[in-house]
Image (spheres, rainbow, N blue to C red):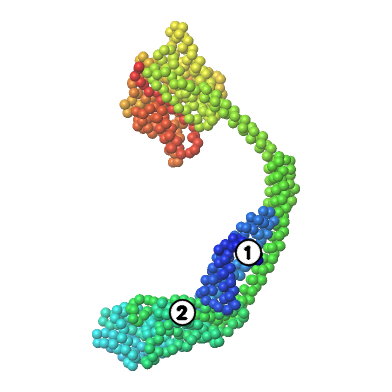
Amino acid sequence: MADLNRIRASVRNLYRKVGRVGLIFAIALALFIGMLLAKSAGAFLALDIVVLAITGIWLAIRSLRHLMNRSLWSLRNRLLAVYALTGVLPILLILVLVGLCGWALTSELAIHLASSELDRRLGTIQAAAEALEKTPKEDRKEAAPSILAYFKVRFPGIALYTTNANGERAYPPDSPPLNLPPGWKTAHGLLERDGKFYGWCHIVKPDENITALAPLTDALIADLVPNLGQIVLTETPHRGGAFESFSFDKQSGAPPAHKTKTDDTPPQHPLAIHNAGVIPPPINRFDIDVPWVAFYPHYDWRDPNIKHSAVLLVRSRPSAVLSAIFTGTDQLRSTLVGAMIAVAILFLLVEIVALVIGVSLSRRIMRAVNELYEGTRRVIYGDFRYRIPVRGSDQIGELTTSFNQMTGNLERLLSVEKEKERLQAELEIAREVQMQLYPKIAPPERGLRLTVCCDPARVVSGDYYDYEPVHTDKLAFCIGDVAGKGISAALLMATVQAALRAQTSAATERFEHGSARSLNAARVVSELNKQVYAHTAPEKYTTFFFGLFDEITGTLTYTNAGHLPPILIRNDTASLLDINGTVVGAFPFSVYDESTVVLEPGDLLICYTDGITEPENAYGEMFGEDQLIEIVKRCRNQEDSAIIRGIIDAVRNWHTADEMPDDMTLLIARRVEAA
């Protein structure tokens, strides 16, 4: 009982390892060995080989995966596996492929030879019918014997028939009546009639029908391809009812004798066997007989115009097929065989040399990999002074040199990374400082409501905006774009803000102390230009727009120093404000003017930087002022923050790239009714 349990446990364990695919492979292998021992051949053997190949490949893949998981951790074992896969396995597969291809090629060639010759013979019958057709009717009686004499050399029993309104006429006259079933159209080829095969051609003309009919005798089928082997022509099983067992005689190798139908015997089963020849003897142990089956189309006498399939079976040997192809060229065949043997020996020698070279190269590769592995372990633990000995000037030597250079550069890279982290931290501090410079709360609505958004392209921005109440009834605001990006632009922005705040604070103090001198837009920009020029590099400048709104009169006094002209939207009409001078900080003696515009309730003033209008799409087209105006007109009745969001989203969708090329700043001033 214990032994039985152990056996069951072993079987279950084996089944878990190989699975259903392994079980199918074992059954297919047992059937294959059994058929080889029994010297059996046929379609079932081919099917078994296909199943064996598919399941074998599947099991091989599973075995390789298991081997890789268990044994292929080291490079040495992996290289050995590569040798097996690229050396041994291809040779075995090539041998199997050569055997299968030789078998299939021999079979196909044998079938092709038999079917091609049968096609040619049937074409001869068609030629006989066409010859009678082309003969004038009045001359057919004299010409028919000549036509029959010519074609009887290939078809002893050939007969020609003409059928018209006067009846049926046969050539020779003693031929049996045709009695062709009605409904036949023009056709030619192979015909089955009363369990026998005929070659025939039927030509339908408006005034008559012409028919050529020749029985395919055993001798004719046997003479299709001399010395090829045995040829069998029969109908498919489903057309004849129960399939009669067909097998070759084990002693002689010949098929069963064909029983000729006589007048006093009932019609034979449609499985009519037309035999051809005997299989030639083998020339060596590998010259095995190969059977192959093909389907050949034919007509049925009782089923007009519909083609059925007959079975053409040829059993031959590779030597017989080659003899049929290369008739009389024994020297050529010997040369081909010798060439194949020479190529096989050369292939074996090449494989041996490749194996020796592969082992030598693999030892060098494994040594280099082990040294690299040791080096990487040293680097992991921080030993950047470890160096690998360089052997040779090939790619492996270059690899070890690169590793030594890498370990020398790693320490420098670490210091660079630390410096980068320090600069990033400083940039974050600069961004926080810059955010502190921007106004934190919205200005009081002194007849004008301001909404601003600044979206920097980098950590810090070079765009500038500001607003501040001046006196009790005025509101000053500005927007600017510093040349460049990054920290230098942010520093210049801070300088501009400090200078502007100083001037507005001074003006407010003068007003509180009763000074008659009020804040002037042109004078503010002129003073700002002098300070920026004096305290910054010559190549640094900024575009600048400064506006001063009077709540009492609703007047906006402004100076535009080279900045993009703001857009005034009034009752679905857009207009651009003036430009009053050049950029700030470029020239010390620049002169600036100021302009005045009266803002009516509901007016929108859009101030923006070039980061809004200059981004390009995939076709190189800029976003432009026209699209900006259209968006503002369409959304003018919405909240100012919603208008800004719509513009920013439209610009980003237009540019499509992840990073915008410039800072985007928008300032919307809306004229509102006084409270």
Q: Does dot 2 land on a helix, a strand or a loop? A: strand
- Three-letter amino acid code at disc 1? Asn
For this rendering, which residue is in front, 530 or 252? 252
For this rendering, which residue is in front, 41 or 609? 41
For this rendering, which residue is in front, 298 or 77? 77
Task: Check whether the beta carbons of the residues at disc 2 and disc 1 lie within 8 A of each other.
Answer: no
The mark found on residue 164 in the picture is: none
The mark found on residue 5 in the picture is: 1
Disc 1 crowd, CA 10 A, few/some/many (<14, 14-19, 20+): few
The total number of labels drawn is: 2
Q: Which image quarter: residue 347?
A: bottom right
Percent x, y of residue 634: 35, 32
**Is 156 placed above or below 604 here?**
below
Chain-order first, disc 2 or disc 1: 1
Percent x, y of residue 535: 56, 20
In whole angstroms, how far apart are the C-alphas of marks 2 and 1? 55 Å
Percent x, y of residue 444: 42, 18
Q: Is residue 381 left or right of residue 673?
A: right
The mark found on residue 312 in the picture is: 2
- Three-letter amino acid code at disc 2? Leu
- Which residue lies most toward the front here? 1
Residue found at x 36% / y 88%: 159
Res. 14 visible in picture: no
Q: Is residue 149 left or right of residue 24?
A: left
Give the foreground label among 2 and 1.
1
Q: Does dot 1 land on a helix, a strand or a loop? A: helix
Task: State which quarter of the image contains the C terminus.
Answer: top left
Task: State which quarter of the image contains the N terminus.
Answer: bottom right
